[in-house]
Amino acid sequence: MGIELQDITKKFGSYTAIDDISLNVASGELVALLGPSGCGKTTLLRIIAGLELPDAGKIILENKDTTNLPPRKKNVGFVFQHYALFRRMTVFENVAFGLTVLPHKERPSRTEIRDRVEHLLKMVQMEWALKRYPSQLSGGQRQRVALARALAVNPKVLLLDEPFSALDAKVRQELRRWLRKLHDEIHVTSIFVTHDQEEALELADRIVVINKGKIEQQGTPQEVYDHPANAFVYNFLGNVNVFHGRIHNGKVTLGSHRVDAPDELKHSEEKPSRTFVRPHEIGISRIRSSDTDLTGTIKEVRLMGGQIGLNLECEGFEHPIEAEIPRDLYINLQLSRGEKVFVSLNRVKVFTGDYAI
Amino acid sequence: MGLFQTKRRNILPGFGLSMGYTVFYLSAIVIVPLSMIFFNTFPMGWDPFVHAVTAPRVLASYRLSFSTALFAALFDAVAGLLTAWVLVRYRFPGKQFLDALVDLPFALPTAVAGICFATLYSPVGWLGETLTKWNITIINSATGIVIALVFIGFPFVVRTIQPVLEEVEREIEEAAHCLGATRWQTFRKILLPHLFPALLTSSTLAFARGIGEYGSVIFIAGNLPMKTEIAPLMIMSKLDQFDYAGASAVALVLLLISFSMLLVLNGVQEWQQKEYR
């Protein structure tokens, strides 16, 4: 097992940042800790690195209890959100730092250090920047150097704290794919923290959704996205329309409409429910195809790249419904503001019980 | 570049005006008053000038002034860095009080400080009594002068280092720790290079202040000819004897040496900063 966390708890004063979390990460796995800001995900990462001490619980890295070891003895690579490069050192010196601070007996020779640094910089495609200073590099380049620096000491685990969130959208996407590729090559056990669900879905082998210091759900991106364990997870993994209603006799009310309740709630007693529909799972048509279709009017059209966002006012619904349709469909149907359309809710997800975001 | 930036359109407005103001201000406050030293010295002629500034007593006073100021500045650099570190990095009761204490040498008339030191270190004073038993003399010695100058220069270092230290991101140190560096390695390889420019600036200030310091030193130095006479004292004693030209001559040399040292130190700082920008 790469990383084993057992019953980790961390409090700051009376505030519980981490509430009894246990988590296993297999060797070579790439895991995303996903959650809103303030949910405790960064604290958990810092606890693994030894930058923060847990109030209770154990941290086992590669079958060795490291709970009370200081960061420098843990042999973890840590990549910070804002790079944390050493400003007064060149890129070469930055990457070599972890090797040059080794005790005399373990320190590799000068040529070995040079070879290793050059190899790492080649791997992160920064070999041309050997003699540059961090201030002469762009954000994306700095983060690559930071990654090479973290990998220089052959860490048992690699921890990345929102590594791409300080970068602009285009670079972020590029680096994301690049990191996935790199991980497939070097297979170091990695955990990265993010609040960006897209990033987690695209990059991770496994996603751990955290809220208020607790794990809400963990699983492959597919599992978490398709079978969210609760309303929080569903809501956090993408844009949603929420309908508040009641569940009664196997039917769920949505505004003035009623749809069949999902199987597991068919025989539920009457209680409040919330129904979620993702904008891209809403069908728009000129012709009524079933009795359950809603009639609506397009109130607003938003260009979103490949998709078109529609703001629909539907009969019997208090709040407008957000839909996303492909651009082709939008053109084929000759839609525009003020047009009447039929709206079908293709995949609804019904949750009962309380949750707060 | 520099002076000629106005030739090209500059995004920042007001270069001409602010530059003019700066030149005028420095002229009125610094250059014109100090140029009086030149004008006072000129009527003297070359030979009497050389004679005045190379007199053994004068040379000894230069040596003493520069060496004690240098030692004091070096001591302040270390002690001031430590103090700034404690004030920035730790929270403890009475921190505000300690922080205010740092500025006291700025506010106190230096003569008061001098009298305090003289009383404290005199053979019957609190500290002097014990030190005399161990055959250590502070008063009437170069050591005493260094102690007075350390006191005077101390706030410069603390107040210059403090904001720079506050700016250091925690993450930088954490990154170093994660990479296996000990606390000492982190300090020496990461923090110290970062603080070095501020350390250089502040000890330069302390050094410059030490060369010119008069009030606090004369009480503790004892002013023994050839032994504990500082350069400003030489100037004062020449003035007392109505030897205005001689006093100006000594002052001129002091001024020139100080200025060229400050110039060199500023150059070093510029060179230090250049690479990372």
Image (cartoon, coloured by chain):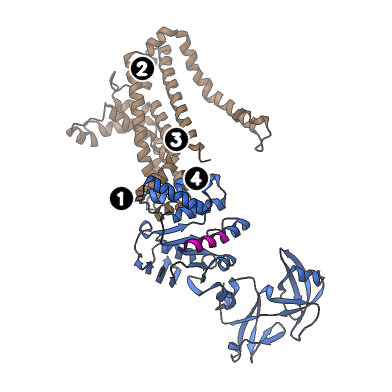
Chain colours: A blue, B brown
Asked if residue B132 lies in the magenta stretch, the reply is no
Front residue of A344/A119: it is A119
Quote the CA–CA distance across marks 3 and 2.
32 Å
According to the picture, the residue beneath numbered tag 4 turns out to be A130
Q: Tell me which amino acid carries mark 3.
A: Thr
To the question of a shared chain for discs 3 and 4, the answer is no
- Residue B237 shows which numbered tag? 2
Q: Nearer the viewer, mark 3 or mark 1?
A: 1
Quote the CA–CA distance across marks 3 and 1.
38 Å
Q: Residue B41: image x %, image y %?
A: 46, 12
Q: Hey, which quadrant is residue B235 in on the image?
A: top left
Which residues fall within the magenta stretch? A177-187
**Number of residue marks:** 4
Q: Tell me which amino acid carries mark 2.
A: Ser
Q: Residue B28: image x %, image y %?
A: 55, 24
Q: Tell me which amino acid carries mark 4.
A: Leu
Quote the CA–CA distance across marks 1 and 2.
63 Å
Q: Nearer the viewer, mark 3 or mark 4?
A: 4
Q: State if disc 2 and disc 3 touch (CB < 8 Å).
A: no
Q: State if disc 4 and disc 3 touch (CB < 8 Å).
A: no
Q: Is residue A287 above or below residue B55?
A: below
Front residue of B205/A18: it is A18
- Residue B201 shows which numbered tag? 3
